[in-house]
Image (cartoon, rainbow, N blue to C red):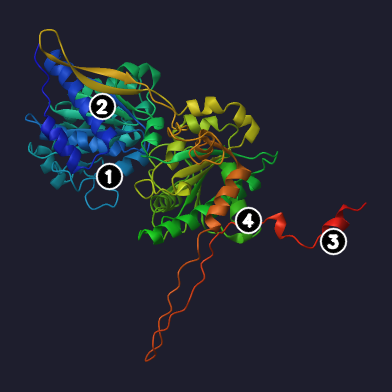
């Protein structure tokens, strides 16, 4: 039995060069150590397969980029990486992630300088030359259907290519250093996928997902659950919001959502101006049951009768039945929704956006489904978890995402613990241990994760409501379930306290500069004593029958 062979210096270099978040760096380290355990310590020859379970919004793309950098930089480097995606939406996003110059690209700090190879360009002269270059790092990006099927997306990859002497699929299976990175791995596990992988003869297979299948639990070498990501402030805090009354009609719920959106936009503009940042324009994601329902919600939003016509021309409907130019325009508008110039403020979807849509300015999720638990258990919640300003701002309204529930507040309150428990899971880390004969081995270990929704009071805190550090105050501040009435009151009061935009008055030519005073409203408490009341007649008259 040999020792672990892991280039710790390279791991640290990749971590700093790609500016990896701590959990992402730990994920890469876990894969490196467990891969060495498989090949170097245990002497196994079959392909090494594992899963990285990382919360949505933490940065799975950076994990894949870092794995490419590490494996392309070790003494016996890999030069061929195949990224599989469950569909075209994630495939197109991934291509952008690894295309230099794209605003979504992560390649600026990658020394391996990978060349992106797709079904559209692999047979071009320049790309075919790169495929023959053993010193060039290549990243092949395909949907899983392009490899498991010989029709549709798979036609190009399974057709014989004269310059390869085989089909692309067969040619990939002849490589001796193929590393497969399976994005959203939970979407396509099964016999067909297993057969496809087996025929490719990869050296390493790494599944990356936020929701691994239960049957794949033994393959998980790293887990970073959503609760821990919230605690570490890598993603927004989700706040479930429900009405106390019985109004469940679509118009009311949509109006509740845009009201929150108004407040958050005002706060975003104020915070950005104060901190010299480009303001992020908050967006609402409406989750419908059916396409017909989504169209009905769009018609409500696009009418003069709704909120004074404020949302006309600002909605985008995205669903799986779009085709042709209509689909291309919708996807282009979707990709540009983070652009400050984008007119889109409300996105209506059914199921198309559960994975692969990584924008950061979703601040309100309106669940029009029967149960909000569906939103929490699916990856839909992840669409609103990313931080638009990169880190927590310290302004609670900008560090939370509100999920408008279809259920009443009292109903959610009754199952509050069950709902919050869906966001909590144990962590899995890899650690190096020493055996009795002095050999190093890598093993996984589980670590419990506390709920991010409660904080212990400071040691000096007194337990009374007036103390902001008391348990009651802290519980209220981080309460993950709020009534709509309370939440609208909080956000309304906070946004109304923001001063209006500063105005600049340029002096007229050849005139002296003058200063124009502005009045700032400052809240002041005023105590009134009964000793200050001298005229008793009004009070006496009120007391008479």
Q: Is residue 502 rendered to the left or right of residue 481? A: left
The residue sitting at 43% across, 26% down in the picture is 424
Residue corresponding to mark 3: 537
Disc 3: CA contacts within 10 A as few (<14), some (14-19) or many (>=20): few
Disc 2: CA contacts within 10 A as few (<14), some (14-19) or many (>=20): many
Q: Which mark is residue 204?
A: none
Residue corresponding to mark 4: 527
Q: Quarter-wise, where is residue 234 in the image?
A: top left
Pointers 2 and 3 in contact (C-beta within 8 Å): no
Whole-angstrom CA distance, mark 4 to mark 1, is 60 Å
Instruction: Label 3, secondary structure: give it.
Output: helix
Residue corresponding to mark 2: 206
Q: Earlier in the sequence, mark 2 or mark 3?
A: 2
Q: Earlier in the sequence, mark 2 or mark 1?
A: 1
Q: Nearer the viewer, residue 200 or 300?
A: 300
Instruction: Label 2, secondary structure: give it.
Output: strand
Q: Earlier in the sequence, mark 4 or mark 3?
A: 4
The residue sitting at 42% across, 57% down in the picture is 271
Disc 1: CA contacts within 10 A as few (<14), some (14-19) or many (>=20): many
Vertical comparison of 99 with 456: above or below? below
Whole-angstrom CA distance, mark 2 to mark 1, is 18 Å
Residue corresponding to mark 1: 97
Q: Position of residue 217 (x, y in %)?
A: 34, 18
Foreground mark, 2 or 3, reads: 3
Vertical comparison of 354 with 108: above or below? above
Q: Quarter-wise, where is residue 88 in the image?
A: top left
Q: Position of residue 398 (x, y in %)?
A: 45, 49
């Amino acid at each position: 039995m040999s020792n672990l062979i892991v280039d710790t210096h390279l791991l640290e270099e990749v971590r700093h060069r790609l500016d990896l978040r701590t959990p992402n760096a730990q994920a890469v380290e876990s894969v490196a150590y467990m891969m060495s355990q498989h090949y170097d310590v245990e002497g196994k020859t079959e392909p090494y397969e594992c899963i990285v379970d990382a919360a949505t919004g933490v940065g799975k793309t950076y994990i894949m980029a870092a794995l490419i950098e590490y494996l392309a930089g070790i003494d016996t480097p890999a030069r061929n990486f195949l990224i599989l995606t469950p569909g075209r939406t994630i495939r197109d996003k991934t291509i952008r992630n690894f295309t230099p110059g794209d605003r979504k690209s992560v390649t600026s700090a990658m020394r391996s300088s990978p060349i992106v190879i797709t079904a559209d360009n692999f047979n071009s002269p320049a790309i075919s030359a790169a495929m023959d270059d053993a010193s060039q790092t290549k990243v092949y990006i395909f949907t899983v259907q392009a490899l498991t099927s010989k029709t549709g997306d798979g036609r190009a990859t399974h057709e014989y290519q004269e310059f390869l002497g085989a089909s692309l699929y067969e040619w990939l299976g002849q490589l001796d250093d193929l590393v497969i990175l399976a994005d959203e791995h939970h979407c396509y596990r099964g016999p067909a996928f297993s057969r496809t992988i087996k025929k490719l003869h990869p050296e390493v297979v790494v599944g990356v997902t936020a929701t691994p299948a239960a049957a794949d639990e033994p393959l998980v070498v790293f887990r970073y659950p959503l609760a821990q990501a919230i605690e570490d402030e890598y993603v927004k805090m989700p706040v479930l919001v429900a009405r106390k009354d019985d109004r469940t009609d679509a118009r009311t719920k949509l109006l509740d959502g845009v009201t929150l959106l108004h407040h958050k936009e005002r706060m975003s503009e104020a915070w950005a101006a104060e901190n010299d940042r480009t303001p992020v324009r908050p967006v609402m994601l409406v989750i419908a049951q059916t396409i017909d329902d989504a169209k009905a919600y769009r018609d409500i939003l696009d009418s003069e009768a709704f909120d004074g016509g404020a949302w006309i021309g600002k909605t985008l409907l995205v669903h799986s039945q779009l085709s042709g130019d209509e689909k291309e325009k919708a996807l282009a508008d979707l990709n540009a929704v983070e652009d400050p110039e984008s007119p889109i403020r409300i996105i209506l979807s059914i199921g198309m956006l559960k994975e692969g849509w990584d924008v950061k300015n979703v601040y309100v999720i309106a669940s029009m489904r029967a149960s909000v638990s569906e939103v929490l258990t699916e990856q839909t919640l992840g669409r609103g978890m990313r931080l638009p300003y990169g880190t927590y701002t310290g302004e609670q309204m900008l560090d939370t995402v509100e999920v408008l529930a279809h259920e009443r507040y009292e109903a959610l309150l009754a199952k509050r613990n069950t709902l919050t428990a869906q966001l909590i899971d144990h962590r899995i880390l890899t650690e190096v241990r020493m055996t009795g004969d002095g050999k190093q081995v890598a093993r996984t270990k589980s670590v419990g994760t506390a709920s991010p929704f409660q904080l212990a009071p400071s040691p000096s805190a007194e337990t009374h409501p007036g103390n902001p550090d008391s348990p009651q105050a802290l519980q209220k501040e981080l309460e993950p379930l709020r009534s709509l009435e309370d939440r609208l009151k909080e956000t309304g009061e906070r946004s109304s306290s923001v001063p209006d935009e500063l105005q600049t008055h340029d002096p007229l030519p050849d005139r002296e500069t003058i200063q124009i005073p502005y009045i700032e409203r400052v809240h002041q408490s005023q105590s009134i004593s009964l000793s200050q009341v001298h005229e008793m007649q009004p009070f006496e008259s009120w007391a008479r029958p």
